[in-house]
Image (tube, rainbow, N blue to C red):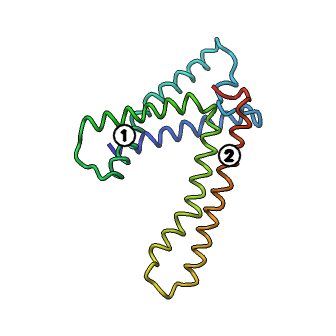
Amino acid sequence: MQMVSNISFFAMFVMYFLTAIFGYLTFYENVQSDLLHKYQSKDDVLILTVRVAVIVAVILTVPVLFFTVRSSLFELAKKTKFNLCRHIFVTIILLVIINLLVIFIPSMKDIFGVVGVTSANMLIFILPSSLYLKITNQDEDKGTQRIWAALFLGLGVLFSLVSIPLVIYDWACSSGSDEGH
């Protein structure tokens, strides 16, 4: 199943990457967060085919994403034995959360903003410095480097505390625009 997940993720990456490239080359700076809204022709067979392809891609990737998220949650909770009731319960909870996000979040731009801010700060500042502090916990020779790592960690937390509210503020201020679904 891991191989199926890897192939599916790679195929979706290629599809979304090509969509982004051709969307940008078509509209340049006028690209909206939902690219298919820019194509207005309702009778164009090519546009309808692309819309059907996107729907099929979303339908086929959701089970793979559910498998990955469920596996991660069970790994995090250290649940190794399969339990059908727990499996169904987690799937229903994930479906409810995803449907609520789709209903209440106006566009993908907002999701990418929050995910970008949190993951960038975690990957660049917080995780490396906290892992370094954990690894060198007992090493007394690394005192100066540990201080710099702690400052780097504090800088990452500060960036998170500043940038996440800015993204949410931008989200709240742009809620009246017509770019949503």
Quadrant of the rendered image containing residue 15: top right
Quadrant of the rendered image containing residue 171: top right
Residue at the (58%, 47%) spot, across then down: 115
| Vertical order, 139 against 15 (above or below) | below
Cα separation between marks 1 and 2: 30 Å
Q: Position of residue 140 (x, y in %)?
A: 48, 87
Question: Mark 2: which amino acid?
Answer: Val
Residue 55 in the figure: left or right of residue 94? right
SS under mark 2: helix
Task: State the count of labels.
Answer: 2
What residue is disc 2 on? 167
Question: Mark 1: which amino acid?
Answer: Phe
What residue is disc 1 on? 67
Please tell me how crowded label 1 is: few (under 14), some (14-19), or many (20+) other residues with Cα within 10 Å. some
Q: Position of residue 95 (x, y in %)?
A: 43, 31
| Vertical order, 122 against 104 (above or below) | below
Question: Which residue is nearer to you in this view: 20 or 169?
Answer: 169
Q: Position of residue 118 (x, y in %)?
A: 58, 52
Residue at the (62%, 20%) spot, across then down: 47
